[in-house]
Image (cartoon, rainbow, N blue to C red):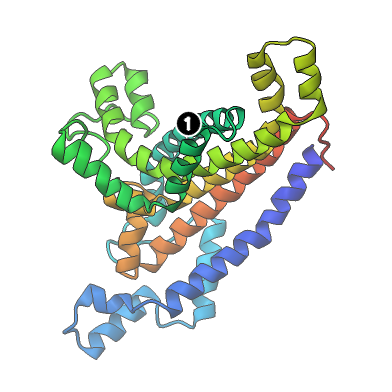
Amino acid sequence: MIKYVLKRLALLVPVLIGVSIIVFIVMHVLTSDPTSIILGQHASADQIAALRKQLGLDNPLYIQYLDFFKGLLHRDFGNSLITQTSVWSELTTRLPATVELAFTSIIIASIVGVTIGVISAIKQNSIIDYISMIGALLGVSMPIFWLGLILIVVFSLQLHILPVSSRIQVGMEPAHITGFYILDSIFTGNMEALGDSIKHLMLPSIALASYSTAIIARMTRSTMLEVIGQDYIRTARAKGLAERTIIIGHALKNAFIPIITVIGLQLGSLLGGAVLTETVFAWPGIGSYTIDAILKADYPVVQGAVMLMAVIFVSVNLLVDLLYGLLDPRIKYS
């Protein structure tokens, strides 16, 4: 096991180097010059040249990349070109908001998706199955930002049940312990802040979970149908075992490896792909921070955010691989 983990960690190095090269080239070649954004359209050529020299943008690209890569080795993503604040500090401040949103979304998607998939498999070709799969198709096809706007219109503007944006009402923030408002509210016993943070979390997490729910439901259904047709399931029924025991204790357990793979991939995608959701709901996470940086051609922020998301994504995939051995003792790592 240890040898396998070390081997996988070693393979992450070229992957992350490749990601760093791609994001660096894209930001420096395909985006506009940030000096024109900082100084405005009426800046003189001398002012632009002076600012480029001050920011190090007049150096050759390979020199800029080497400086960027050296910073990565020391967990230093540099400073924002616009605000001059530390990118690492901003990312770590906003990371709990993104993680809280992503984990809430994947919990919702996993519970709802697995439940729908199992019921659809048991009730194959029934009206319940058809409705479930139509819902899954809509979930895959429906743009998250569009669903987010619909949820805002219905539950915020029409029914006035849930808030439109942000993580919590101003002035109700719990004492900072972990940066996760739900956990901090529980740790400090602040039930008012807990309730308000959950209310703010509901709409963005539902919108973000919609696609993952559909993917998990479809995978669960197809895997369960394959497992239900196996001989050992028929044998279990012949022995007179309760249907619930057969479905949950035998079928779902053996079908769970491909399901956990999809859940792990979706979690990685949610952590790195909550950009539109955070933008629609003004959620102060890494996604909205990155979008703002892209619009301003703020190279260090975008590069740092992409690298952090890449590390999280490959780490989640590694953890999913290691979970296989716990779910199926037949799997051996070598």
Q: Nearer the viewer, residue 75 or 37?
A: 37
Position of the C terminus, as image quadrant, is: top right
Image side of residue 11 versus residue 80, left or right: right
Which residue is found at the position 25% from the left and 90% from the top?
45
Q: Which quarter of the figure has residue 56?
A: bottom left
User: Considering only vertical position in the picture, is 32 above or below 223?
Assistant: below
Q: Nearer the viewer, residue 79 or 306?
A: 306
Q: Which residue is mark 1?
A: 112
Q: Nearer the viewer, residue 205 or 25?
A: 205
Q: Position of residue 67 (x, y in %)?
A: 51, 69
User: Would residue 164 be seen by someone viewing this image from the given angle?
Assistant: no
Tally of numbered tags: 1
| Residue type at the position of mark 1 | Val
Q: Position of residue 35 (x, y in %)?
A: 29, 77
Q: Residues within 10 Å of mark 1 (few under 14, many from 20)?
A: some
Which residue is found at the position 35% from the left and 80% from the top?
53
Image side of residue 230 versus residue 318, left or right: right
Q: Position of residue 175 (x, y in %)?
A: 29, 27
Q: Which quarter of the figure has residue 167?
A: top left
Which residue is found at the position 45% from the left and 59% from the top?
304
User: Considering only vertical position in the picture, is 190 above or below 38?
Assistant: above
